Image (cartoon, helix red, strand yellow):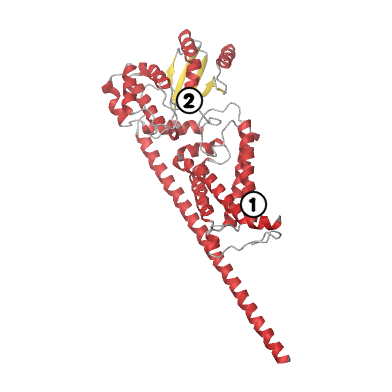
Amino acid sequence: MKARFQIAQPWLSTLARLFLAAVFIWAGWPKFLDSEGTVRSVRAFELLPEALVRPFAYGLPLIELALALVLVLGLATRIAALVTGAMMITFMFGIAWAWAHGLKIECGCFGNTGATVVDAVPGYIKDLFRDTGYLLAAAFLAYWPHSRVSVDGLLGLSTPQPVTSGTA
Amino acid sequence: MVNARQAKSAREKAAEMRAEAARQEARRRAIAIVSAVVAVIVVAVGAGIIIQTARHNQQTKVQAATAPPQHLTNGGFFVGKKESKVTIEIWEDFQCPACKNFEELNADQLTKWEADGTVKVEYHPVAILDRMSTTNYSTRALNAAAAVINTTPDSFLKFHTLLFANQPPENGDGLPDSQLIDYAVQAGVKRADVESAITGQKYIGWATKVTEDFSKVKHFTGTPTLVINGTVLSDYAPDKLKAAVEAAAKK
């Protein structure tokens, strides 16, 4: 069982990389294209002071796309995975905040539809579950960053990990 | 014997030191590469933020320089009798399917209320859904509405109804400007009055400004947004709307 996992793990890590990269492209690209819409989405959380709304809304999609790039390349994989996990925790905090404050918004995680939300709670629950899934993928990758087809591998920055220790 | 053992141990030690040096070298390289990647990303993101902020500031300057259309009350288009006790403010986007739905459900009722003096309405068209077409239809439709309001205010409601009835599908190309002009003409506007304002996007500055102002109001997050005598009504089903209007009229 252990031996089998040892063979599968680098491939699973590659899968996790590509999956998270796809999520970030899917999330970042619409936000980047509709930057004013992203500004409005960020503002709707009522979490940031107005002076920080624009820098955050402009920067977030760029960070998401940059992370997608390094994840596809498999560059600095462990750090990318840790940053991804930290972002997921931040997003989940934002959604929980909106829920706790009774805001009726869409998270705008993948761009907004702009529709007035009558009951936002089912959306919040769904978003939190989804982000938990992404967080687990990021945690897996942070724990086992050694993966197939990666720049880390080419540069010799990554070595196979014994299953028991999990350290690079 | 002793010498041979010492020599072997010295060789082992040297090999160990070489391996340790190689490990340290690999570590240094890893840190250098990761730092370079992080630095490039930080610079790129920072530059992106600065460029987009500069572009936004430039647009704000253009906005300040363009005049809003005439015939607006409180920034909205007023319909009804001044003495009506109930005011409904409606924020709508011409690309928004929920707004089309709202109009289909409630437009007749609103017209009745406006006529009998129960309700006065302030229409606030905004453009939050440029993402939903390849041609920024949201903003172009809002610009066209401004052109109609400015020249032929009596035609606005009809134009507004035509646009919702003929709303283009989401993620399509929107309606072309020529079609917007045709609908304006159909609503009773003289073609020459609005043609250049529609094709030339004369009110685009105003359109971005009202949309930005809309999003800055607390708890205004989507369209349609209905405010009845100052209170947001999020469920606009006809019976809910009727109940809210009756409650507001009694106060």
In the rendered structure, the residue with mark 1 lies on which chain? A
Number of dots carrying numbers = 2
The answer to whether residue B83 is visible is no
In the rendered structure, the residue with mark 2 lies on which chain? B
Q: Name the kind of residue labelled 1 in the image.
A: Phe
The answer to whether residue B131 is visible is yes
Dot 2, how many residues are within 10 Å of its Cα: few (below 14), some (14-19), or many (20+)? many
User: Residue B16 or B68: which is nearer the viewer?
Assistant: B16
Tell me if residue B158 comes above or below residue A132 in the rendering.
above
In this rendering, the label closer to the viewer, 2 or 1: 1
* Tag 2 and tag 1, C-beta contact below 8 Å: no
Instruction: Return the x and y of residue B201 as percentages of the image width and height.
Output: 33, 31
For numbered disc 2, what is the local secondary structure?
A: helix
User: Residue B75 or A88: which is nearer the viewer?
Assistant: A88
Instruction: Return the x and y of residue B227 as percentages of the image width and height.
Output: 53, 22
Instruction: Return the x and y of residue A122 as percentages of the image width and height.
Output: 63, 31
User: Residue A19 or B166: which is nearer the viewer?
Assistant: A19
For numbered disc 1, what is the local secondary structure?
A: helix
Instruction: Return the x and y of residue A5 as percentages of the image width and height.
Output: 67, 55
Q: Name the kind of residue labelled 2 in the image.
A: Pro
Residue at 38% x, 27% y: name it: B141
**Marks 2, 1 in one chain:** no
Dot 1, how many residues are within 10 Å of its Cα: few (below 14), some (14-19), or many (20+)? some
Q: Is residue A11 left or right of residue B106?
A: right
Q: Which residue is mark 1?
A: A140
User: Residue A57 or B77: which is nearer the viewer?
Assistant: A57
The quarter holding residue A153 reads bottom right
Q: Please identify the residue farthest to the top as the structure is shown.
A: B116
Residue at 28% x, 26% y: name it: B195
Q: Which residue is mark 2?
A: B97
Tell me if residue B189 comes above or below residue A52 in the rendering.
above
Residue at 43% x, 18% y: name it: B78
